[in-house]
Every structure is written in C-alpha cells, then in structure tokens.
C-alpha cells in the first residue's frame, strides 16, 4: 500500500552524502497537498582549518639572512653573489593562503513542486528557494620587519685586479596574525530531484542543488562549495514520512 506516503504531511530526512564531506545535513518537509510542499534544510561542513599551523592569535618568528656580493672595483658592476642564505636556525614560517576556511553552515527554505503518477513509487520535483549561509574562516596576514641591518665592505685581490666585496646581514622579525571571522550571506537556489518510495514510510531522494550567492566573504583564496559565487552540489538523502 502507498496510502501513508501519499497522505503523510510530514517528512524527516538525513543527507548521507554530507558525511563524505566531513559534515552532516538534515531536512524537514511539510506537504500541503500532493503537488506542493515546503522544505526546511540545513547543511554543515568542517574544513581544513583544523590542520597543523592554523591558530587564532599572533605568532612572532625571528631569523637572520646574509648575502655576499662581489663588485667590480671601478664600475660597481656585480661580478658574483652568494645569494641570500640563513645564518641561524630560524626560518621563515611556511607560506599560507590569506584566508583559510573553518566551517560552513547553510539553512535553506524551498517550495517544492512535485510531479508523479498514481500508484507510482517515483516522484520528480523542482524546488526553488532561498538560503542563508554562515561561513567561519581565518584571515591571515604576515608582517616582516628588519630589526637590524649590518653592511661590511672590503677589497680583495692585488692592484690593479682588485674587487670590492659587500656583505649584508639582516635580522628579521616576522609576525603572523590569524583572526577567526564569521560572515553571513544569502543565496537564491534551485533543486532538481527524484524520489523513490520504499513501502509506506521510507523513501530515498537524489538531488542536484545549484545556487548563486549575492556576495562572497573573500576571493583571494579557494572557497568551499557552498560559499562560492555560483555552486552546484549533488546529494543523496533518506527520509521517513509520518
């Protein structure tokens, strides 16, 4: 019998594909009639900001560099150079993106229009809607300051084949700041999906959700899918009607 699925006005759903993205998703659907329903959906994902080297605060780092150049005695033309090299155990901090995503939470409200045949276990539906997204991320900045600079000059070789040697030594202070930010933004979305019923209450949905955010929190670093200007996200959910 399909009567319970046909007349059940409420449905709870779990997005199993979200577990593959280190997140979770749930939805509630209210069926006004057999053709129209409302769906409230939430989706949460954690991102790479829990990896090593990410923190909330300031990091002071110190290191020293040296460079030795050989110059022509009269023209000061560069003849040879050692290039910059480190003279202490300190090293610059590894390069990072200016923004690193921590988590994304999206809540959506959509109106579903369903198309199905009587006694069929399959439904096809379209669902335009609007969503609000909350994005947590780290904003990262590096400031380099030369605390000490020493330059030594001397002459090598015998006249008239002398050359000048210039050695520069820098003591550098690198300050890296990471601040946790929190931004809200809205999007228009459109879902297309198909539902398969299994008995009176259980069903499985496959959907493709697409959307466009009105604005994005940053553009200098890669954004997670739901925070991008335009996004497409497939999903598989299972639910229970009552």
Image (cartoon, rainbow, N blue to C red):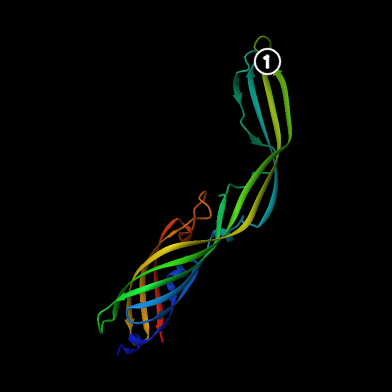
Quarter of the figure with residue 199:
bottom left
Decide if residue 121 is on the left or right side of residue 105: left
At x 63%, y 19%, the residue is: 71
Residue 38 location (% of width, % of height): 41, 76
Q: Secondary structure at mark 1?
A: loop
Q: Quadrant of the C terminus?
A: bottom left
On screen, 239 above or below 89?
below
Q: Is residue 188 visible?
A: yes
* Along the line of sight, the residue nearer the viewer: 93 or 43: 43
Q: Is residue 89 visible?
A: no
Q: Quadrant of the N terminus?
A: bottom left
* Mark count: 1
Residue 103 location (% of width, % of height): 54, 63
| Disc 1 packing (10 Å; few <14; some 14–19; many ≥20) | few
Quarter of the figure with residue 205:
bottom left
At x 74%, y 30%, the residue is: 150
* Along the line of sight, the residue nearer the viewer: 69 or 26: 26
Query: Circle 1 sits on which residue?
Result: 157
Decide if residue 136 is on the left or right side of residue 131: right
On screen, 91 above or below 126?
above
Residue 25 location (% of width, % of height): 47, 72
On screen, 212 above or below 173?
below
Residue sticking out furthest to the top: 160
């Amino acid at each position: 019998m399909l009567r319970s699925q046909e007349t059940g006005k409420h449905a709870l759903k779990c997005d199993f594909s979200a577990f593959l993205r280190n997140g979770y998703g749930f939805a509630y659907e209210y069926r006004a009639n057999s053709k129209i329903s409302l769906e409230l959906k939430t989706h949460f994902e954690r991102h790479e900001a829990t990896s090593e080297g990410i923190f909330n605060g300031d990091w002071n780092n110190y290191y020293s560099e040296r460079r030795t150049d050989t110059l022509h005695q009269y023209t000061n033309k560069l003849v040879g150079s050692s290039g910059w090299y480190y003279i202490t155990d300190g090293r610059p901090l590894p390069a990072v993106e200016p923004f690193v995503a921590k988590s994304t939470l999206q809540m959506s409200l959509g109106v579903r229009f369903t198309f199905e045949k009587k006694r069929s276990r399959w439904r096809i539906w379209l669902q335009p809607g609007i969503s609000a997204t909350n994005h947590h991320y780290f904003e990262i900045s590096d400031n380099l300051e030369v605390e000490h600079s020493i330059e030594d000059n001397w002459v090598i070789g015998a006249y008239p084949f002398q050359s000048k040697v210039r050695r520069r030594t820098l003591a550098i202070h690198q300050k890296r700041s990471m601040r946790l930010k929190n931004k809200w933004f809205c999007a228009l979305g459109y879902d297309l999906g198909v539902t398969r019923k299994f008995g009176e209450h259980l069903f499985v949905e496959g959907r493709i959700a697409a959307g466009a955010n009105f604005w994005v929190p940053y553009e200098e670093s890669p954004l997670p899918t739901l925070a991008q200007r335009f996004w497409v996200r497939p999903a598989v959910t299972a639910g229970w009607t009552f």
